[in-house]
């Protein structure tokens, strides 16, 4: 009886495991390198960001994930080097990934630079079928991106997953994400120690409608940051409902080296895979550490 019950629970949770790097992709506000390897080193200072994500803080062993990112500049500011790691446990399985990125920064005009970057690594995905329940396999990951930026404006174009993996008849083959990201944003000094960072993100994915994210962050005295964003579109072809949601965030610069943050998403990005009842929102805690900051990091 216990084996039968376990099998039912396992099969009921399979649809939660196909998100691949979706958790990391949706953390692009706190970590732009997650969707564009060309952002590697754009902030200049070496920095590290850790994000802890959990659905219910009051329930033990509830779905959670952890991501880590680090990047900085070397070779007199010409090369950016970065590293990212993902540990996502949104169901019975755990999905992990490790990625390294490299970006070359070059001046192209007065006050403008162009960064061209690449990223490579592995995704360890739970490939499941009726005859083999729970077989994790490692797949290669490769992506490219470009980032054109000045002190007050930036444009990004990237495809963080380029490889067309062979999953055979597995259901994950239909849900494997290879999104194309196009983004534009800016930095505007509103006076009285107020800094506004608006952005627009456009996403095109396989078997989904066009998606647009609108958002921004307001920094007050370079100490407190308040953010709001809204995601529209991106409806999967196999679903009648788009996963629209909003995100609110707050960050506090508690010292020259440490920044703490909290993010709340009204729905999970992978909501279209989940049939379980209960709260749809998800919470994220962020810790950012910059060992030797030269100036204030806007992003």
Image: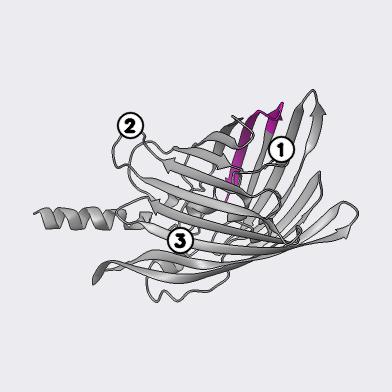
Q: Foreground: 76 or 111?
A: 76
Q: Quadrant of the C terminus?
A: top right
| Principal secondary structure, stretch drawn in magenta | strand
Q: Residues within 10 Å of mark 1 (few under 14, many from 20)?
A: few
Q: CA distance from mark 3 to mark 2?
A: 27 Å
Badge number at residue 97: 3
Colouring convention used in this rendered image of the protein: one colour
Q: Name the image quarter holding residue 4.
A: bottom left
Q: Nearer the viewer, residue 176 or 288?
A: 288
Is 183 colored magenta in this rendering? no
Residue placed under numbered mark 2 in the picture: 58
Q: Which residue is mark 1?
A: 296
Residue 107 shown left or right of residue 277 in the figure: right
Q: CA distance from mark 1 to mark 3?
A: 30 Å
Q: Earlier in the sequence, mark 3 or mark 2?
A: 2
Nearer to us: label 1 or label 3? 1
Kind of element beneath mark 1: loop
Residue at horizontal 41 percent and vertical 74 percent from the top: 167
Q: Is residue 230 magenta?
A: yes
What residue is rendered at 50% in x and 50% in y?
68
Front-most of residues 273 and 217: 217
Q: Which x, y percent locates residue 143?
A: 60, 67
> Which numbered disc, 1 or 2, marks the residue closer to the eye?
1
- Give the image location of residue 203, x and y in percent: 63, 55
Q: Position of residue 41 (x, y in %)?
A: 68, 55
Q: Earlier in the sequence, mark 1 or mark 3?
A: 3
Q: Identify the disc placed on residue 190.
A: none
- Find the magenta span and give its range: 218-233
């Amino acid at each position: 009886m216990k084996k039968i019950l376990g099998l039912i629970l396992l099969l009921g949770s399979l649809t939660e495991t196909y998100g691949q790097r979706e958790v990391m992709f949706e953390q692009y506000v706190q970590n732009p390198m997650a969707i564009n390897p060309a952002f590697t080193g754009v902030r200049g200072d070496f920095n590290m960001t850790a994000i802890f994500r959990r659905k219910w803080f009051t329930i033990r062993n509830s779905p959670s994930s952890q991501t880590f990112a680090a990047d900085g500049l070397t070779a007199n500011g010409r090369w950016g080097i970065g590293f990212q790691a993902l540990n996502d446990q949104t169901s019975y399985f755990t999905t992990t990934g490790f990625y390294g990125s490299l970006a070359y920064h070059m001046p192209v005009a007065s006050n403008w630079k162009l960064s061209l970057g690449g990223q490579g690594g592995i995704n360890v995905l739970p490939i499941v079928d009726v005859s083999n329940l729970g077989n994790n396999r490692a797949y290669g990951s490769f992506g490219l991106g470009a980032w054109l930026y000045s002190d007050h404006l930036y444009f990004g174009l990237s495809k963080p997953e380029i490889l067309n993996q062979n999953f055979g008849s597995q259901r994950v083959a239909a849900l494997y994400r290879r999104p194309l990201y196009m983004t534009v944003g800016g930095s505007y000094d509103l006076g009285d120690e107020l800094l506004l960072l608006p952005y627009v993100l456009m996403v095109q994915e396989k078997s989904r409608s066009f998606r647009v994210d609108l958002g921004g962050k307001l920094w007050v005295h370079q100490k407190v940051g308040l953010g709001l964003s809204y995601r529209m579109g991106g409806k999967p072809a196999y679903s009648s409902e788009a996963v629209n949601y909003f995100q609110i965030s707050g960050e506090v610069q508690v010292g020259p080296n440490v920044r703490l943050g909290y993010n709340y998403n009204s729905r999970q990005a992978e909501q279209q895979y989940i049939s379980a009842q209960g709260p749809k929102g998800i919470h994220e805690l962020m810790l950012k550490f910059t060992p030797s900051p030269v100036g204030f990091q806007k992003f």
